[in-house]
Image: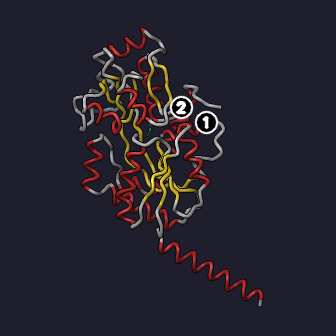
Amino acid sequence: MLRRAMLATASAGLLAGRASAQAYPSKPITIVVPFAAGGPTDLMARIVGERMAKEVGQQFIIDNTTGAAGTIAVGKVARAAPDGYTIGIGHVGTNVANGTIYKNLTYNLLTDLEPIARLPANPMLVVTSDQVQAKTLKELVELLKANPDKIPGGTAGMGSGSHLGALAFFAATGAKYQLVPYRGTGPAMQDLIANQIQVMVDQSSNSLPQVRAGKVRAYAVTAKARSSAAPEIPTAAEAGYPMEVSIWHGLWAPKGTPPEVISRLNAAAIATFQDPAIRRRMEDLGQDIPTPAEMAPATFAAFHKAEYARWAKILEAANVKVE
Ligand code: ASP
């Protein structure tokens, strides 16, 4: 009797589980964003969330959990219930570089998260406040070399994209600026415009609109070729200091999230970036959009792993770590 009752309960549970997977999503989905509102990752999350909501018929709620270069936010996602209602957006900093830089992480970036989809990538721009006198990248480098490590520059913390950009800049030019950490380059950009800080290497999606508005000055793009979104800005190599850094974003769920939930979200993300209006908006911000094949969870997982190994070598060689 007891056994039969237990069996009945078990199969009811199974049915309920199946029914809820079929009905997914039946309530809003939270996207944990590891940086402040108004910055490049927040912008990507909002674009994705708004468009994916149309695909899945539920709203996406943006949760900006800032601090410690995204390590707090990623931990929140790794520990969340794997039910598809909490997912995270991250990038080559939060979900790749941080694994090498932060020795005390309580989660494993490669094994505690389930990849949902690779998202677009953008190069960075070397920018300064318009109060800075340098007119070219060479003049900027001379100015920084004349004031070693003194001129304040913005980053979103150790391991963020703007920190990786700064490291590439230091390596390519031999010049250094003082790294001032912010909760995201959205607020850092406001301080750059106000000349509270003078320099930043920041994602084109955040810096290009301010360059176009004449609020900050751009010297170079950290890509092999000029961006069609800003063909007037020289590549770093053309400006005399070759450096290439591309900041790609991605979506992840907690490990153990059901495969059908991952597929549903992946399909919604792919549909988002096939939308011509979204594509135009992305391209206007200098973003490179991955193909649907590149966005597939398994392909994205392999790409993530390769990027992890590549950045581990670069960061270990540069001896960048936080205990
Ligand atoms: N992606 C960060 C942000 O949204 C900036 C960075 O990584 O540099 O603020």
Q: Nearer the viewer, residue 303 or 3?
A: 3
Residue name at image x 57 percent, y 78 percent: 16
Horizontal side, residue 282 vs residue 38: left or right: left
Residue beneath disc 1? 102
Residue name at image x 36 percent, y 30 percent: 222
Q: Amino acid at mark 2?
A: Met
Q: Are marks 2 and 1 in contact (CB under 8 Å)?
A: yes
Q: Amino acid at mark 1?
A: Tyr
Q: Which mark is residue 323?
A: none
Q: Earlier in the sequence, mark 2 or mark 1?
A: 1
Horizontal side, residue 48 vs residue 101: left or right: left
Disc 2 residue crowd, few under 14, some 14–19, many 20+, Cα 10 Å: many
Q: Which quadrant of the figure shows ligand 1?
A: top left
Horizontal side, residue 146 vs residue 11: left or right: left
Q: Nearer the viewer, residue 164 or 16?
A: 16
Residue 318 image offset from top left, x and y in percent: 55, 25
- Seen as rendered, the residue at the extreme bottom is 1
Query: Could you tell me which secondary element the residue under label 1 belongs to?
Result: loop
Q: Which mark is residue 158?
A: 2
